[in-house]
Image (spheres, rainbow, N blue to C red):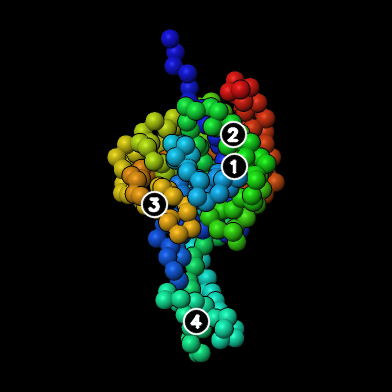
């Protein structure tokens, strides 16, 4: 008997700015170079209408694989908070008092990814959960953001719910131009070994992705405002040379190719998963 292929969601995360913090705290807010599990799980929870105190155990069971279409560039933004306020309205300190005159302005540094684009596969054996998440991404209870509220997506996030999502993750058109300097590997990041990626390329990739390359503390345990908690998880990385035909550039050409792929491959697959 042939084993039934895994099902999953395919997402597109692209926008002028994104920010996926892993060590953000107080006045320093960093960003990872790829979407984090905590950021994506939080986005799903917002779409489903879950309050911050609600458990997310079911959502953390989703396996996530990220394809980096465009890595973008890191921008550091300069923020000030509390300046120019009267003494009784300045920022509160840890001991519950107001900051004194001349010290009411706080300076924070925040990092963003500019002009980045990612394609994600979320896989699970729980098809009911996948369909609930798909419905939430199509019609979210609360607005969806790319890591922070100041980072809205440039268009619909959900591409579809499909069988064998990793195959589509490799084959979907890339939102990037083919490098003039010659073939460059496309990065994939996952929370599970990436040797299973169905790569069809004549060029050898950089490593099989079956050995984790480090850890990242982005596995959410709780989003409760006063009790946020995350734990580390292994990070798997694989750099793959994809065929030149996968590169579809930017703008309308890419969107037309993406829509054509969805129309050709996703309609039948979505019917099978219902």
Quadrant holding the C terminus:
top right
Q: Is residue 1 left or right of residue 11?
A: left
Element type where label 4 sits in the image: loop
Question: Which residue is labeled 3 in the image?
Answer: 230
Q: Are marks 2 and 1 in contact (CB under 8 Å)?
A: yes
Looking at the image, residue 124 lies above or below residue 57? above
Residue at the image position 39 percent from the left and 41 percent from the top: 191
Q: Are marks 2 and 4 in contact (CB under 8 Å)?
A: no
Name the residue nearer the viewer: 232 or 58. 58
Question: Which residue is labeled 2 in the image?
Answer: 132
The CA span between labels 2 and 1 is 8 Å
The CA span between labels 1 and 4 is 37 Å
Label 1 crowd (10 A; few <14 / some 14-19 / many >=20): some
Q: Is any part of residue 83 visible from this angle?
A: no
Q: In which quarter of the image is residue 188?
A: top left
The CA span between labels 1 and 3 is 21 Å
Residue at the image position 45 percent from the left and 59 percent from the top: 226
Question: Which residue is labeled 4 in the image?
Answer: 98
Question: Which residue is labeled 1 in the image?
Answer: 48
The CA span between labels 2 and 4 is 45 Å
Q: In this view, does 266 lie to the left or right of 197?
A: right
Label 3 crowd (10 A; few <14 / some 14-19 / many >=20): some
**Mark 4 or mark 3: which is in front?**
4
Q: Earlier in the sequence, mark 1 or mark 3?
A: 1
Q: Earlier in the sequence, mark 4 or mark 3?
A: 4
Residue at the image position 49 percent from the left and 68 percent from the top: 110
Name the residue nearer the viewer: 169 or 28. 28
Label 4 crowd (10 A; few <14 / some 14-19 / many >=20): some
Q: Which of marks 2 and 1 is nearer the N terminus?
A: 1
Q: Earlier in the sequence, mark 1 or mark 4?
A: 1
Which of the numbered marks, if any, corresponds to residue 173? none
């Amino acid at each position: 008997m042939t084993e039934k292929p895994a099902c999953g969601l395919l997402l597109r995360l692209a926008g002028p700015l994104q920010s996926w913090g892993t060590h953000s705290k107080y006045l320093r807010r960093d960003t990872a170079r790829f979407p984090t599990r905590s950021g994506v799980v939080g986005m799903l929870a917002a779409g489903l209408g879950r309050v911050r105190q609600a458990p997310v155990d079911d959502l953390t069971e989703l396996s996530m694989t990220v394809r980096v279409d465009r890595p973008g560039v890191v921008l550091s933004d300069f923020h000030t908070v509390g300046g120019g306020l009267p003494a009784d309205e300045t920022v509160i300190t840890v001991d519950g008092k107001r900051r004194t005159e001349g010290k009411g302005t706080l300076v924070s540094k925040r990092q963003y990814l500019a002009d980045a684009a990612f394609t994600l596969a979320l896989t699970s054996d729980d098809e009911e959960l996948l369909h609930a998440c798909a419905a939430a991404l199509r019609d979210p209870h609360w607005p969806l953001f790319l890591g922070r509220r100041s980072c809205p997506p440039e268009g619909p996030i959900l591409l579809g719910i499909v069988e064998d999502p990793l195959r589509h993750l490799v084959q979907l058109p890339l939102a990037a131009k083919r490098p003039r300097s010659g073939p460059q590997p496309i990065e994939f990041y996952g929370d599970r070994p990436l040797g299973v990626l169905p790569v069809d390329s004549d060029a050898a990739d950089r490593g099989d992705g079956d050995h984790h390359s480090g850890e990242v503390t982005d596995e959410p345990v709780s989003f409760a405002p006063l009790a946020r908690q995350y734990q580390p998880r292994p990070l798997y990385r694989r750099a793959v040379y994809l065929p030149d035909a996968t590169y579809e550039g930017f703008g309308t050409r890419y969107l037309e190719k993406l829509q054509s792929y969805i129309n050709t491959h996703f309609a039948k697959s979505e019917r099978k998963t219902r």
